Image: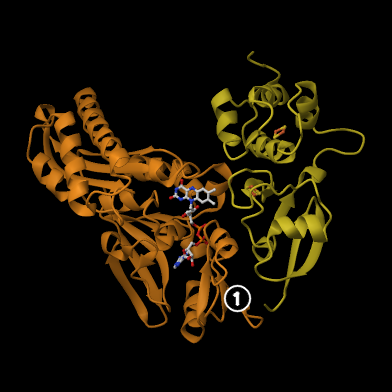
Chain colours: A orange, B yellow
């Protein structure tokens, strides 16, 4: 049953929002695209809350800001804003591509990056790129500010490291190094069966044809997206042109099974993941060759 | 839940409603404001039948609580064209037989409207992208794409 005394709050400043959160137990509302679906599907969605706090009028967290060393993306930035941002497209192509692959035009117009990460589905599309770019999440409460690596932020599907009195205000991404490349690919749509979705975010730094840094983060392959460190170690320091994409694909599939074990979805995911890794390495080889 | 007073504009008219904070914009438009051109299909953001323009952008009214409409301008299919003269998009949908059962049509036209407001000569790909959140079970989309092209610049690829 819905609590009759639940109250609706909206804030126009982060300070105001965290004060409200200090005194009340409130369910946060951003673009509402997960919130409204959950509200419909889960009878106990608002159980235990004093009310709802709407963040959609807080302009200070709708901005993308470039500093000397990093870029700060506000939590209320929509996927549409990300797709439209020349800065994001230039510095973080994989993030722009992942935002562009989300839902549909009306969903992207409304859904936010903060909501995508706080909802923390295993298939949250911007999560892989944020981890690959070594992003940090900035959390605020009435007691102050703390930051956390995005890779540490999501604990388990639908579980994050945020406290009940905190708001996620932004993500901080280091600026790309010289020779940085990135890409995002996704197979399948949400609407279809859940197993038909899998994605891969790649960030690499290439110097004179040698892989100096590489982060490979598949989405939906593991309960929480994580860097595939064994495959990364395999590739790092090697001449890009000498890497066999097919072999990397097979190793990635093995690494996934090492993390998840054999599951009912493994027969589908294994070849799908191998294909994504193979394609990603091939594309990287072609892109670097073309940029010569 | 405690009711909330919300003021916004619908089809250029100021409205004020008192709603539960979880009431969907879809229900406010259909049930309180009698704008039944807004359709409910899936109720979970997948079909686009409930599409309206929210400050000029296409959104799913089944996923927006009305409380978030405060101060916004909402456009529904009823706000397009007049009794005597249809909007060029509406006329074009008729001319190109882009309407069969008609259930998807209001949402489809509004998604196309959002596109044409920003881009007066869209490519086929632009049009497909703009209606990627609107499902149609009847037409196969081709007539719809042609209708939008026709309304935009009159050049229709067969
Ligand atoms: C039809 C459809 C298709 C979709 N397709 C995709 C897809 O392809 N890929 C994908 O990744 N997702 C998809 N989604 C899921 C959803 O759109 C995204 O997860 C979206 O980014 C959520 O953002 P929001 O602003 O709508 O969040 P909301 O629904 O408002 O909030 C989501 C959750 O995060 C919490 N929250 C929001 N903002 C903050 C904050 N700043 N601080 C703390 N907590 C916060 C809320 O309390 C809530 O629990 C789809 C959804 C629908 C309905
Ligand atoms: S009813 Fe809103 S998208 Fe289907
Ligand atoms: S005309 Fe019937 S769904 Fe489009």
Q: Residue at horizontal 55%, vertical 33%? A: B129
User: Label 1 belongs to which residue?
Assistant: A9
Classify A30 as above or below A101: below
Answer yes or no: is residue A111 visible: yes
| Left/right of residue A45 with respect to residue A200 in the rendered view | right
Quadrant of the rendering where the C terminus of chain B is positioned: top right
List x then y, in percent, for residue B32. 81, 61
Extreme residue in the right direction: B84
Answer yes or no: is residue A182 visible: no
Extreme residue in the bottom direction: A23
Q: Residue at horizontal 60%, vertical 27%? A: B122
The answer to whether mark 1 is within 8 Å of ligand 1 is: no
| Left/right of residue B49 with respect to residue A55 in the rendered view | right
Quadrant of the rendering where the N terminus of chain B is positioned: bottom right
| Left/right of residue A288 with respect to residue B39 in the rendered view | left
Label 1 chain ID: A
Q: Nearer the viewer, residue A63 or A77?
A: A77
Classify A192 as above or below B1: above
Classify A143 as above or below B157: below
Crowd class of label 1 (few under 14; some 14 to 19; many from 20; radius 10 Å): some
Q: Which of A292 and A10 is in front in this view?
A: A10
Secondary structure type for disc 1: strand
List x then y, in percent, for residue A181. 25, 38
List x then y, in percent, for residue B114. 65, 39
């Amino acid at each position: 049953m819905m609590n009759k005394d639940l109250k609706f709050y909206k804030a126009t400043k982060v300070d105001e929002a965290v004060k409200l959160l200090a005194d009340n137990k409130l369910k946060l509302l951003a673009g509402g695209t997960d919130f409204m679906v959950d509200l419909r599907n889960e009878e106990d969605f608002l159980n235990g809350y004093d009310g709802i706090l709407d963040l959609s009028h807080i302009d200070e967290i709708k901005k993308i800001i470039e500093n000397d060393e990093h870029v700060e993306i506000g939590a209320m930035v929509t996927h549409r804003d990300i797709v439209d941002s020349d800065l994001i497209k230039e510095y973080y192509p994989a993030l722009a591509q992942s935002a562009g692959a989300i839902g549909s035009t009306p969903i992207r117009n409304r859904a936010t990056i903060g909501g995508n990460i706080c909802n923390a589905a295993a298939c949250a599309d911007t999560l892989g790129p944020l981890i690959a770019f070594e992003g940090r999440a900035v959390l605020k409460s009435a007691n102050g500010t703390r930051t956390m690596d995005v890779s540490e932020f999501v604990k388990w599907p639908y579980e994050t490291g945020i406290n009940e009195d905190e708001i996620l205000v932004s993500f901080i991404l280091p600026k790309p190094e010289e020779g940085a490349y990135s890409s995002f690919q996704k197979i399948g749509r949400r609407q279809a069966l859940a197993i038909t979705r899998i994605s891969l975010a790649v960030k690499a730094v290439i110097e004179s044809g040698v892989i100096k840094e590489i982060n490979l983060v598949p989405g939906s392959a593991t309960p929480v997206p994580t860097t595939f460190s064994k495959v990364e170690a395999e590739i790092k320091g090697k001449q890009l042109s000498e890497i066999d994409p097919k072999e990397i694909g097979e190793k990635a599939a093995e690494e996934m099974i090492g993390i998840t074990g054999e599951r009912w979805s493994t027969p589908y995911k294994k070849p799908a993941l191998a294909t994504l890794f193979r394609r990603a390495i091939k594309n990287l080889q072609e892109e670097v060759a073309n940029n010569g | 839940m405690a009711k909330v007073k919300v003021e916004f504009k619908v089809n250029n008219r100021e409205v004020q409603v008192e709603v539960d904070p979880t009431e969907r914009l879809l229900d406010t438009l259909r049930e309180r404001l009698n704008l039944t051109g807004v359709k409910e299909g899936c109720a979970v953001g997948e079909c686009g039948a409930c599409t309206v323009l929210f400050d000029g952008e296409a959104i799913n009214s089944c996923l927006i609580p009305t409380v978030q409409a405060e101060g916004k301008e909402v456009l529904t299919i009823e706000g397009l064209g007049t009794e005597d003269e249809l909007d060029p998009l509406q006329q074009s949908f008729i001319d190109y037989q882009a309407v069969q059962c008609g259930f998807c049509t209001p949402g489809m036209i509004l998604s196309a409207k959002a596109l044409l407001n920003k881009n007066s000569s869209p490519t086929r790909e632009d049009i497909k992208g703009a209606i990627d959140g609107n499902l149609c079970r009847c037409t196969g989309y081709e007539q719809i794409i042609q209708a939008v092209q026709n309304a935009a610049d009159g050049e229709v690829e067969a």
